[in-house]
Image (spheres, rainbow, N blue to C red):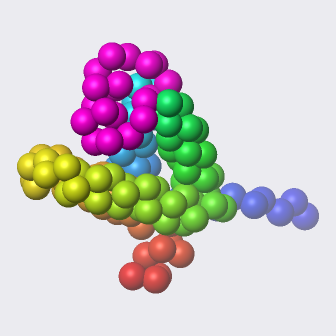
Amino acid sequence: MEATLERAVEPSVWPGRVVSGIPTLFMLFDAAVKFSRASFVAEASERIGFPNDLNPALGVVVLACLALYLVRRTSVLGAVLLTGYLGGAVAIHLRVGDPLASHTLFPVYVGVLFWVGLALRDARVRNLL
């Protein structure tokens, strides 16, 4: 008697992966830019009052949070940490007086996509909601 351990894939898993992929790709791009040492990154850091030397460390933080988010077992922890990181971005944009809808709330939009994607692909999160 051979037991098969196939798991039924819920219909919302693939849409959840697609929705999760959008902010994940954005944050991967953001981390890569932080490592690039491009002049526009240094200018943006200066404008918001951050030393340019912090950019690689921020890139590592983003990559670590993304790694936690992408592993099913730690995805909720990753989403919480990414939410905190993005909340810091909102605070910085508020402090420097950036436009509300395009700059200040953009991290909120990204965070919502992270959580919607996670809720679609993980029944544990849907049950909490």
Q: Residue at x 56, y 38 (%)?
A: 57
Quadrant of the drawing holding the N terminus: bottom right
Q: Residue at x 66, y 61 (%)?
A: 73
Query: Of 37 and 25, which appears nearest the observer?
Result: 37
Number of disc labels: 0
Q: Is residue 49 part of the magenta span, yes or no?
A: yes
Quadrant of the drawing holding the C terminus: bottom left
What is the x, y in percent for residue 70?
A: 56, 49
Q: Is residue 126 left or right of residue 124?
A: left
Query: Of 44 and 121, which appears nearest the observer?
Result: 44
- Residue 11 in view of the camera: no
What is the x, y in percent for residue 85?
A: 43, 55
Q: Residue at x 28, y 42 (%)?
A: 48
State which quadrant residue 111 falls in.
bottom left
Q: Residue at x 13, y 51 (%)?
A: 97
Q: Is residue 47 left or right of residue 125?
A: left
- Residue 89 in view of the camera: yes
What is the x, y in percent for residue 108?
A: 26, 59
| Prevailing secondary structure of the magenta residues | helix
State which quadrant residue 37 falls in.
top left
Q: Is residue 32 part of the magenta span, yes or no?
A: no
Q: Which residues are magenta?
A: 34-52
Indicate whether 31 appears above or below 73: above
